[in-house]
Image (cartoon, rainbow, N blue to C red):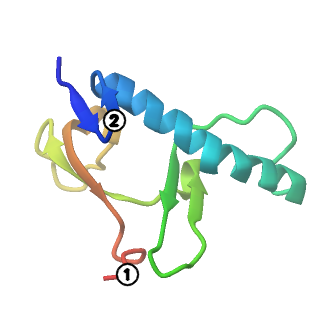
Amino acid sequence: MPIFVMGDLMLIDDKEMGNRLFNHASEIWINPEVERRIKAGSLPNQPYYLHAAQIISFTDGRENIIRLNDEVKTEIVGVASNTLQPNEEFVIHEGLRQINSLRLTKEDDPH
């Protein structure tokens, strides 16, 4: 079982670290954004099913960009389960064996 030490915080394993990260991100950014959108009328005032979220932070003082569900844009670097045939569409939950990294799209990357 891997152990990670960050300052005085010890994280027991990847799953626990992921849960903590998600819970903190939800509390700080995602839930307030959902509530803001409900108040603004851009989301219905009913239970909201979240399947993806993306928070883009900037070091130059610009406001964070918070994307929910289908708004999320990313490039996935990974290992495919098999070779795609010509004109075959890649489906992430069927065609990806391993995710090595996620990165911003060229449109979003400030560098």
The residue lying toward the viewer, choosing from 111 and 17, is 17
* Pair 1/2: label in front: 2
Name the residue that disc number 2 marks.
8
Instruction: Tell me: 36 left or right of 58.
Output: right
Above or below 26: residue 10: above
- Label 2 environment density (alpha carbons within 10 Å; few <14, some 14–19, many ≥20): few
Residue 44, picture quadrant? top right
Q: As drawn, which residue projects farthest toward the front?
A: 8
Question: Residue drawn 34% across and 76% down?
Answer: 106
Q: Which mark is residue 110?
A: 1
Q: Secondary structure at mark 1?
A: loop
Question: Residue drawn 66% across and 34% down?
Answer: 49
Q: As drawn, which residue projects farthest toward the top?
A: 1
The residue lying toward the viewer, choosing from 79 and 20, is 20
The residue lying toward the viewer, choosing from 30 and 83, is 30
Task: Pinpoint residue 39: horizontal percent, then vertical percent.
Answer: 88, 53
Task: Pinpoint residue 90: horizontal percent, then vertical percent.
Answer: 29, 47
Instruction: Tell me: 110 left or right of 51.
Output: left
As shown in the figure, which amino acid type bears the numbered disc 2?
Answer: Asp
Question: Residue drawn 48% across and 64% down?
Answer: 56
Above or below 14: residue 62: below
As shown in the figure, which amino acid type bears the numbered disc 1?
Answer: Pro
Residue 63, picture quadrant? bottom right
The residue lying toward the viewer, choosing from 44 and 86, is 44
Q: Secondary structure at mark 2?
A: loop
Task: Pinpoint residue 61: horizontal percent, then vertical percent.
Answer: 54, 79
